[in-house]
Amino acid sequence: MMIDGFFEAQLMWRLLFPADRRELREPSADYGGMLDGMEAAQLMALMVMVQERLKRLGVGVERLAEPVELFIDKNYNIRMCGADGQILNLRPLVKTLFILFLKHPEGILLKQRDAFRAELEEIYGMISPNTDRDDVKARVARLVDLEDNSFSEKASVLNARLKELLPDEIAGEYQISGYNGCPRKIRLNPLLVHWE
């Protein structure tokens, strides 16, 4: 049996409670009002729980979670699912790296990351405006230094944070990935990234 998402919204709560339920049927109540008050991240988490519950019931479910749009303002605040959506909170240098890769969907060769030094300094300066200019330069210098592990550390922190915030099915779309010798990139469709 396959479900294409038609009953998703109404089935969510009913399928989660009670836990020993063994049959699948459309609930009689309208749960739309409850869902309207939920944030995007809460809805996505709920969808993942529903998908897991359906698997336990033996129901095959096509992918419920789809990548969501990112809205990035001039100060590099990142919102998910719309201009009024939930803000994606990241540490300044981690966010700087995320913004850089979102600006370069073609990818970046790690051995050539020094070519992005000025852009990284500009982004980091906007994200952390109260940071001393020399401190900005020093932190970015560590990010682009091939002998320093700062880049790998920040990329790992970013990928782990995104995995915490997003369903497993879509987290990979937002993470920095790639193979040695090939450009590292974020796989997210650039059309889902809106620069305001």
Image (cartoon, helix red, strand yellow):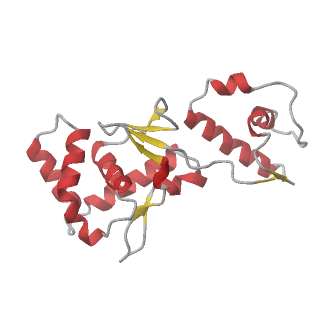
Is residue 141 rendered to the left or right of residue 33?
A: left
Which residue is at 52% across, 57% downward? Answer: 172
Q: Position of residue 148 (x, y in %)?
A: 21, 64
Q: Where is residue 17 in the image (x, y as percent from the top left)?
A: 79, 33
Is residue 22 rendered to the left or right of residue 133?
A: right
Q: Position of residue 120 (x, y in %)?
A: 23, 52
Residue extending farthest bottom: 181
Q: Quadrant of the C terminus?
A: top left
Q: Which corner quadrant of the image does residue 88 belong to?
A: top left
Q: In which quarter of the image is the N terminus?
A: bottom right
Q: Which corner quadrant of the image does residue 131 belong to?
A: top left
Is residue 45 rendered to the left or right of residue 130?
A: right
Closer to us: 196 or 26: 196
Closer to us: 53 or 186: 186
Query: Up-down: is 117 above or below 71?
Result: below
Query: Up-down: is 56 above or below 177?
Result: above
Which residue is at 91% across, 42% downward? Answer: 23
Which residue is at 78% across, 49% downward? Answer: 4
Q: Where is residue 87 in the image (x, y as percent from the top left)?
A: 43, 34
